[in-house]
Amino acid sequence: MIAQLAFAFLASAGLAAFILLTRSVHLHLTGSDRHEGPQHMQLQRLPRVGGLAVFIGFFIAVGVARFFGYISAPTQSMANTLGLCSLPVVIAGLLEDLSNRVRPLWRMLAAFVAAMLAVYLLGANIHSLHLAFFDKWLSQYGWISCAITLLSIAGLVHAMNIIDGLNGLLGGVCLLIFAALGLAANRAEDTLLTNICVLCFGVTAGFFGFNFPKAKLISGDGGAYFLGFMIALLSVLLVQRNPAISPWFPLLLASYPITETLFSIIRRLIKGSKISGADNRHLHSLMAFSLKEKHQAGHRVFLGFNAGASIRCMGLALFGAVSAWVFVDDVPMLQWMCLGFVLLYLLIFYNETKKQMLSPYSEVSKSGSATLP
Protein backbone atom coordinates (compact mmCIF):
# COMPACT_ATOMS: atom_id res chain seq x y z
CA MET A 1 0.00 0.00 0.00
CA ILE A 2 2.88 2.38 0.74
CA ALA A 3 4.19 2.12 -2.82
CA GLN A 4 0.79 2.88 -4.37
CA LEU A 5 0.39 5.82 -2.01
CA ALA A 6 3.84 7.16 -2.90
CA PHE A 7 3.26 6.82 -6.65
CA ALA A 8 -0.04 8.67 -6.44
CA PHE A 9 1.31 11.40 -4.17
CA LEU A 10 4.37 12.06 -6.33
CA ALA A 11 2.38 12.03 -9.59
CA SER A 12 -0.16 14.55 -8.32
CA ALA A 13 2.39 16.75 -6.52
CA GLY A 14 4.71 16.72 -9.54
CA LEU A 15 1.94 17.80 -11.90
CA ALA A 16 0.75 20.46 -9.43
CA ALA A 17 4.28 21.83 -9.22
CA PHE A 18 4.51 21.89 -13.03
CA ILE A 19 1.24 23.84 -13.29
CA LEU A 20 2.51 26.28 -10.68
CA LEU A 21 5.94 26.74 -12.28
CA THR A 22 4.41 27.41 -15.69
CA ARG A 23 1.67 29.76 -14.44
CA SER A 24 3.20 32.75 -16.21
CA VAL A 25 2.40 30.98 -19.50
CA HIS A 26 -1.22 30.03 -18.78
CA LEU A 27 -2.45 32.27 -15.94
CA HIS A 28 -4.25 34.55 -18.39
CA LEU A 29 -6.37 31.50 -19.29
CA THR A 30 -6.43 29.50 -16.08
CA GLY A 31 -6.32 32.25 -13.46
CA SER A 32 -9.22 33.84 -11.66
CA ASP A 33 -9.71 36.55 -9.10
CA ARG A 34 -11.30 34.27 -6.56
CA HIS A 35 -13.13 37.01 -4.70
CA GLU A 36 -15.28 37.57 -7.81
CA GLY A 37 -17.64 34.75 -6.78
CA PRO A 38 -19.52 35.07 -3.46
CA GLN A 39 -18.87 31.47 -2.43
CA HIS A 40 -15.08 31.76 -2.74
CA MET A 41 -12.77 33.23 -0.12
CA GLN A 42 -9.54 33.44 -2.11
CA LEU A 43 -8.22 36.99 -2.46
CA GLN A 44 -5.57 36.58 -5.13
CA ARG A 45 -5.26 35.42 -8.71
CA LEU A 46 -4.47 31.69 -8.75
CA PRO A 47 -4.44 28.90 -11.34
CA ARG A 48 -7.74 27.11 -10.99
CA VAL A 49 -6.84 23.97 -12.90
CA GLY A 50 -5.32 22.05 -9.99
CA GLY A 51 -7.88 19.37 -10.73
CA LEU A 52 -5.79 18.39 -13.74
CA ALA A 53 -2.96 17.37 -11.41
CA VAL A 54 -5.35 15.11 -9.50
CA PHE A 55 -7.10 13.69 -12.58
CA ILE A 56 -4.01 13.02 -14.72
CA GLY A 57 -1.98 12.04 -11.67
CA PHE A 58 -4.50 9.30 -10.92
CA PHE A 59 -3.99 7.65 -14.32
CA ILE A 60 -0.20 8.00 -14.06
CA ALA A 61 -0.21 6.42 -10.60
CA VAL A 62 -2.39 3.53 -11.79
CA GLY A 63 -0.07 2.86 -14.72
CA VAL A 64 3.12 3.04 -12.65
CA ALA A 65 1.68 0.86 -9.88
CA ARG A 66 0.66 -1.76 -12.43
CA PHE A 67 4.03 -1.57 -14.24
CA PHE A 68 5.90 -2.39 -11.02
CA GLY A 69 3.40 -5.09 -10.06
CA TYR A 70 1.86 -3.38 -7.01
CA ILE A 71 -1.69 -3.69 -8.33
CA SER A 72 -3.36 -6.43 -10.35
CA ALA A 73 -4.67 -6.19 -13.91
CA PRO A 74 -8.33 -6.20 -12.69
CA THR A 75 -7.53 -3.33 -10.32
CA GLN A 76 -5.93 -1.36 -13.14
CA SER A 77 -8.92 -2.03 -15.38
CA MET A 78 -11.41 -0.97 -12.71
CA ALA A 79 -9.43 2.17 -11.82
CA ASN A 80 -9.04 3.23 -15.44
CA THR A 81 -12.73 2.62 -16.12
CA LEU A 82 -13.69 4.72 -13.10
CA GLY A 83 -11.46 7.52 -14.29
CA LEU A 84 -12.78 7.38 -17.85
CA CYS A 85 -16.39 7.37 -16.64
CA SER A 86 -15.69 10.65 -14.85
CA LEU A 87 -14.51 12.29 -18.09
CA PRO A 88 -17.82 14.01 -19.03
CA VAL A 89 -18.14 15.84 -15.73
CA VAL A 90 -14.40 16.59 -15.50
CA ILE A 91 -14.49 18.17 -18.98
CA ALA A 92 -17.58 20.19 -18.04
CA GLY A 93 -15.84 21.39 -14.89
CA LEU A 94 -12.64 22.34 -16.72
CA LEU A 95 -14.62 24.26 -19.34
CA GLU A 96 -16.31 26.18 -16.53
CA ASP A 97 -12.92 26.84 -14.90
CA LEU A 98 -11.57 28.28 -18.15
CA SER A 99 -14.61 30.18 -19.35
CA ASN A 100 -17.04 30.74 -16.45
CA ARG A 101 -19.78 30.23 -19.02
CA VAL A 102 -20.96 26.64 -18.58
CA ARG A 103 -24.45 26.76 -17.13
CA PRO A 104 -25.18 24.68 -13.98
CA LEU A 105 -27.76 22.67 -15.92
CA TRP A 106 -25.16 21.47 -18.43
CA ARG A 107 -22.75 20.55 -15.64
CA MET A 108 -25.49 18.61 -13.87
CA LEU A 109 -26.31 16.79 -17.12
CA ALA A 110 -22.61 15.95 -17.51
CA ALA A 111 -22.66 14.45 -14.00
CA PHE A 112 -25.66 12.29 -14.96
CA VAL A 113 -23.92 11.14 -18.14
CA ALA A 114 -20.85 10.16 -16.12
CA ALA A 115 -23.06 8.30 -13.65
CA MET A 116 -24.85 6.48 -16.48
CA LEU A 117 -21.51 5.38 -17.90
CA ALA A 118 -20.56 3.94 -14.50
CA VAL A 119 -23.87 2.12 -14.19
CA TYR A 120 -23.50 0.68 -17.70
CA LEU A 121 -19.78 -0.16 -17.70
CA LEU A 122 -19.31 -1.17 -14.06
CA GLY A 123 -22.79 -2.31 -13.13
CA ALA A 124 -22.78 0.12 -10.21
CA ASN A 125 -26.18 0.17 -8.56
CA ILE A 126 -27.80 0.84 -5.20
CA HIS A 127 -29.86 -2.25 -4.37
CA SER A 128 -30.58 -1.53 -0.71
CA LEU A 129 -31.01 1.44 1.61
CA HIS A 130 -31.61 -0.69 4.71
CA LEU A 131 -35.12 0.76 4.88
CA ALA A 132 -37.72 -1.98 4.53
CA PHE A 133 -40.33 -0.03 2.55
CA PHE A 134 -37.72 1.36 0.12
CA ASP A 135 -35.83 -1.90 -0.29
CA LYS A 136 -39.02 -3.63 -1.40
CA TRP A 137 -39.43 -1.12 -4.23
CA LEU A 138 -35.77 -1.34 -5.16
CA SER A 139 -35.99 -5.12 -5.53
CA GLN A 140 -39.24 -5.00 -7.53
CA TYR A 141 -38.55 -2.03 -9.79
CA GLY A 142 -35.09 -1.83 -11.29
CA TRP A 143 -35.69 1.64 -12.70
CA ILE A 144 -36.12 3.04 -9.17
CA SER A 145 -32.78 1.54 -8.14
CA CYS A 146 -31.14 2.99 -11.25
CA ALA A 147 -32.70 6.43 -10.70
CA ILE A 148 -31.56 6.59 -7.07
CA THR A 149 -28.06 5.53 -8.11
CA LEU A 150 -27.82 8.22 -10.79
CA LEU A 151 -29.23 10.91 -8.50
CA SER A 152 -26.90 9.93 -5.65
CA ILE A 153 -23.78 10.01 -7.83
CA ALA A 154 -24.64 13.27 -9.60
CA GLY A 155 -25.74 14.84 -6.33
CA LEU A 156 -22.53 14.03 -4.48
CA VAL A 157 -20.44 15.25 -7.43
CA HIS A 158 -21.97 18.71 -7.04
CA ALA A 159 -22.02 18.55 -3.24
CA MET A 160 -18.22 18.27 -3.18
CA ASN A 161 -18.00 21.33 -5.43
CA ILE A 162 -20.22 23.36 -3.09
CA ILE A 163 -17.85 22.95 -0.13
CA ASP A 164 -14.84 23.94 -2.26
CA GLY A 165 -14.68 27.52 -1.01
CA LEU A 166 -11.78 27.63 1.46
CA ASN A 167 -8.11 26.66 1.45
CA GLY A 168 -7.82 22.90 1.79
CA LEU A 169 -11.46 22.26 2.69
CA LEU A 170 -12.30 20.08 -0.31
CA GLY A 171 -9.00 18.20 -0.10
CA GLY A 172 -9.23 17.69 3.65
CA VAL A 173 -12.76 16.33 3.53
CA CYS A 174 -11.90 14.04 0.61
CA LEU A 175 -8.84 12.71 2.43
CA LEU A 176 -11.02 11.77 5.42
CA ILE A 177 -13.57 10.01 3.21
CA PHE A 178 -11.04 8.14 1.05
CA ALA A 179 -9.22 6.98 4.19
CA ALA A 180 -12.41 5.66 5.77
CA LEU A 181 -13.58 3.98 2.56
CA GLY A 182 -10.16 2.36 2.15
CA LEU A 183 -10.13 1.09 5.72
CA ALA A 184 -13.64 -0.35 5.29
CA ALA A 185 -12.65 -2.03 2.02
CA ASN A 186 -9.51 -3.45 3.64
CA ARG A 187 -11.56 -4.70 6.58
CA ALA A 188 -13.86 -6.47 4.12
CA GLU A 189 -10.78 -7.94 2.36
CA ASP A 190 -11.73 -6.15 -0.86
CA THR A 191 -8.19 -5.62 -2.16
CA LEU A 192 -9.31 -4.09 -5.46
CA LEU A 193 -11.26 -1.23 -3.89
CA THR A 194 -8.68 -0.80 -1.14
CA ASN A 195 -5.99 -0.12 -3.73
CA ILE A 196 -8.14 2.35 -5.64
CA CYS A 197 -8.97 4.20 -2.42
CA VAL A 198 -5.26 4.39 -1.59
CA LEU A 199 -4.52 5.80 -5.06
CA CYS A 200 -7.29 8.39 -4.66
CA PHE A 201 -6.00 9.31 -1.21
CA GLY A 202 -2.49 9.72 -2.61
CA VAL A 203 -3.40 12.03 -5.51
CA THR A 204 -5.56 14.12 -3.19
CA ALA A 205 -2.74 14.41 -0.66
CA GLY A 206 -0.30 15.43 -3.40
CA PHE A 207 -2.54 18.35 -4.37
CA PHE A 208 -3.48 19.23 -0.78
CA GLY A 209 -0.04 20.64 0.01
CA PHE A 210 -0.47 23.24 -2.75
CA ASN A 211 -3.86 24.32 -1.41
CA PHE A 212 -3.40 24.44 2.37
CA PRO A 213 -2.80 26.38 4.57
CA LYS A 214 -1.99 29.02 1.93
CA ALA A 215 -3.40 28.35 -1.52
CA LYS A 216 -0.98 28.42 -4.41
CA LEU A 217 -3.28 26.36 -6.63
CA ILE A 218 -6.97 25.56 -6.49
CA SER A 219 -8.77 22.48 -7.74
CA GLY A 220 -11.45 24.27 -9.71
CA ASP A 221 -14.75 22.67 -10.65
CA GLY A 222 -12.94 19.99 -12.66
CA GLY A 223 -11.02 18.74 -9.64
CA ALA A 224 -13.99 18.93 -7.28
CA TYR A 225 -16.16 17.02 -9.73
CA PHE A 226 -13.55 14.30 -10.23
CA LEU A 227 -13.04 13.77 -6.49
CA GLY A 228 -16.79 13.83 -5.84
CA PHE A 229 -17.37 11.31 -8.62
CA MET A 230 -14.71 8.94 -7.30
CA ILE A 231 -16.09 9.13 -3.76
CA ALA A 232 -19.64 8.49 -5.01
CA LEU A 233 -18.68 5.52 -7.19
CA LEU A 234 -16.37 3.95 -4.60
CA SER A 235 -19.16 4.27 -2.03
CA VAL A 236 -21.70 2.57 -4.29
CA LEU A 237 -19.27 -0.19 -5.29
CA LEU A 238 -18.12 -0.76 -1.71
CA VAL A 239 -21.66 -1.44 -0.52
CA GLN A 240 -22.58 -3.41 -3.65
CA ARG A 241 -19.53 -5.68 -3.48
CA ASN A 242 -19.68 -6.08 0.31
CA PRO A 243 -23.31 -6.51 1.46
CA ALA A 244 -22.23 -6.55 5.11
CA ILE A 245 -21.44 -2.83 4.81
CA SER A 246 -24.53 -0.67 5.16
CA PRO A 247 -25.21 2.15 2.67
CA TRP A 248 -25.58 4.36 5.74
CA PHE A 249 -21.82 4.03 6.30
CA PRO A 250 -20.75 6.06 3.21
CA LEU A 251 -23.79 8.31 3.72
CA LEU A 252 -22.51 9.29 7.17
CA LEU A 253 -18.98 9.64 5.82
CA ALA A 254 -20.18 12.25 3.33
CA SER A 255 -22.76 13.79 5.66
CA TYR A 256 -21.06 17.21 5.69
CA PRO A 257 -21.18 17.97 1.94
CA ILE A 258 -24.58 16.28 1.61
CA THR A 259 -26.11 18.26 4.46
CA GLU A 260 -24.55 21.50 3.20
CA THR A 261 -26.05 20.92 -0.25
CA LEU A 262 -29.54 19.93 0.88
CA PHE A 263 -29.72 22.78 3.38
CA SER A 264 -28.53 25.26 0.73
CA ILE A 265 -31.31 24.10 -1.61
CA ILE A 266 -33.95 24.43 1.11
CA ARG A 267 -32.58 27.82 2.20
CA ARG A 268 -32.70 29.18 -1.36
CA LEU A 269 -36.20 27.80 -1.98
CA ILE A 270 -37.47 29.53 1.17
CA LYS A 271 -35.74 32.74 0.14
CA GLY A 272 -37.06 32.50 -3.41
CA SER A 273 -33.57 32.41 -4.93
CA LYS A 274 -32.33 30.23 -7.78
CA ILE A 275 -31.30 26.79 -6.52
CA SER A 276 -28.27 26.85 -8.81
CA GLY A 277 -27.24 30.35 -7.78
CA ALA A 278 -24.11 31.10 -5.75
CA ASP A 279 -24.10 32.83 -2.39
CA ASN A 280 -21.92 33.28 0.67
CA ARG A 281 -24.29 31.76 3.21
CA HIS A 282 -22.61 28.36 3.32
CA LEU A 283 -21.37 27.25 6.72
CA HIS A 284 -17.71 27.54 5.70
CA SER A 285 -18.32 31.12 4.49
CA LEU A 286 -19.99 32.11 7.74
CA MET A 287 -17.15 30.61 9.77
CA ALA A 288 -14.61 32.52 7.69
CA PHE A 289 -16.52 35.77 8.16
CA SER A 290 -16.68 35.11 11.90
CA LEU A 291 -12.92 34.54 12.17
CA LYS A 292 -12.18 37.58 10.04
CA GLU A 293 -14.25 39.75 12.34
CA LYS A 294 -12.42 38.25 15.30
CA HIS A 295 -9.16 39.29 13.65
CA GLN A 296 -10.52 42.78 12.99
CA ALA A 297 -11.37 43.04 16.66
CA GLY A 298 -7.68 42.52 17.50
CA HIS A 299 -7.67 38.80 18.30
CA ARG A 300 -5.09 36.40 16.90
CA VAL A 301 -6.54 33.85 14.47
CA PHE A 302 -4.52 30.65 14.00
CA LEU A 303 -3.54 30.21 10.32
CA GLY A 304 -5.73 33.14 9.33
CA PHE A 305 -9.47 33.36 8.78
CA ASN A 306 -9.49 31.25 5.59
CA ALA A 307 -7.47 28.21 6.66
CA GLY A 308 -8.77 28.57 10.23
CA ALA A 309 -12.38 28.25 9.09
CA SER A 310 -11.37 25.35 6.86
CA ILE A 311 -9.95 23.45 9.84
CA ARG A 312 -13.18 23.96 11.77
CA CYS A 313 -15.24 22.55 8.90
CA MET A 314 -12.81 19.64 8.56
CA GLY A 315 -13.46 18.97 12.25
CA LEU A 316 -17.16 18.71 11.49
CA ALA A 317 -16.43 16.28 8.65
CA LEU A 318 -14.10 14.33 10.95
CA PHE A 319 -16.98 13.89 13.39
CA GLY A 320 -19.02 12.22 10.63
CA ALA A 321 -16.11 10.04 9.51
CA VAL A 322 -15.22 8.85 13.01
CA SER A 323 -18.87 8.20 13.86
CA ALA A 324 -19.26 6.14 10.69
CA TRP A 325 -16.21 4.05 11.52
CA VAL A 326 -17.18 3.51 15.17
CA PHE A 327 -20.67 2.28 14.24
CA VAL A 328 -19.77 0.61 10.93
CA ASP A 329 -21.53 -2.63 11.95
CA ASP A 330 -24.52 -1.00 13.68
CA VAL A 331 -27.09 0.10 11.09
CA PRO A 332 -29.55 1.74 13.54
CA MET A 333 -26.74 3.77 15.10
CA LEU A 334 -25.49 4.83 11.66
CA GLN A 335 -29.00 6.07 10.89
CA TRP A 336 -29.28 7.91 14.20
CA MET A 337 -25.84 9.45 13.75
CA CYS A 338 -26.88 10.76 10.31
CA LEU A 339 -29.82 12.48 11.97
CA GLY A 340 -27.55 13.69 14.77
CA PHE A 341 -25.13 15.16 12.25
CA VAL A 342 -27.90 17.15 10.57
CA LEU A 343 -28.98 18.55 13.94
CA LEU A 344 -25.38 19.41 14.84
CA TYR A 345 -24.93 21.18 11.50
CA LEU A 346 -28.11 23.21 12.00
CA LEU A 347 -27.04 24.17 15.53
CA ILE A 348 -23.63 25.37 14.33
CA PHE A 349 -25.18 27.20 11.36
CA TYR A 350 -27.66 28.95 13.66
CA ASN A 351 -24.89 29.94 16.05
CA GLU A 352 -22.70 31.33 13.23
CA THR A 353 -25.63 33.24 11.73
CA LYS A 354 -26.51 34.71 15.12
CA LYS A 355 -22.91 35.86 15.62
CA GLN A 356 -22.99 37.53 12.21
CA MET A 357 -26.24 39.33 13.01
CA LEU A 358 -24.87 40.67 16.28
CA SER A 359 -21.39 41.58 15.11
CA PRO A 360 -20.68 45.31 14.65
CA TYR A 361 -18.13 44.40 11.95
CA SER A 362 -20.52 42.34 9.84
CA GLU A 363 -22.70 43.51 6.99
CA VAL A 364 -25.27 41.04 8.28
CA SER A 365 -26.15 43.35 11.15
CA LYS A 366 -26.88 46.08 8.56
CA SER A 367 -28.39 44.31 5.58
CA GLY A 368 -29.36 40.88 6.88
CA SER A 369 -27.02 38.98 4.60
CA ALA A 370 -23.32 38.36 4.74
CA THR A 371 -21.22 39.96 2.04
CA LEU A 372 -17.60 39.66 1.12
CA PRO A 373 -15.43 42.65 1.94
Image: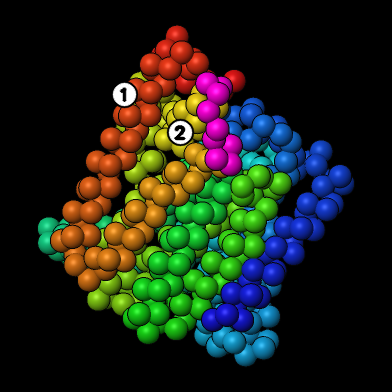
Q: Amino acid at mark 2?
A: Met
Q: 93 or 69, which lies in front?
A: 69
Q: Residue furthest left?
A: 133
- Check disc 1 and report the residue beneath it: 270
The location of residue 93, given as percent across then percent down, is 60, 47
Numbered range of the magenta stretch: 296-305
Q: 117 or 100, which lies in front?
A: 100
Q: Amino acid at mark 1?
A: Ile
Colour scheme of the picture = rainbow
Q: Is residue 56 visible?
A: no
Vertical position of residue 21 compared to residue 56: above or below: above
Q: Residue furthest bottom?
A: 69
- Check disc 2 and report the residue beneath it: 287
Which residue shows up at 66% across the image and 45% down it? Answer: 215
Q: Secondary structure at mark 1?
A: helix
The location of residue 367, given as percent across then percent down, is 45, 10
Which residue shows up at 70% across the image and 69% down it? Answer: 11
Callout 2: 10 Å neighbours few (<14), some, many (20+)?
A: many
The secondary structure that most of the magenta stretch takes on is loop
Vertical position of residue 315 compared to residue 133: above or below: above
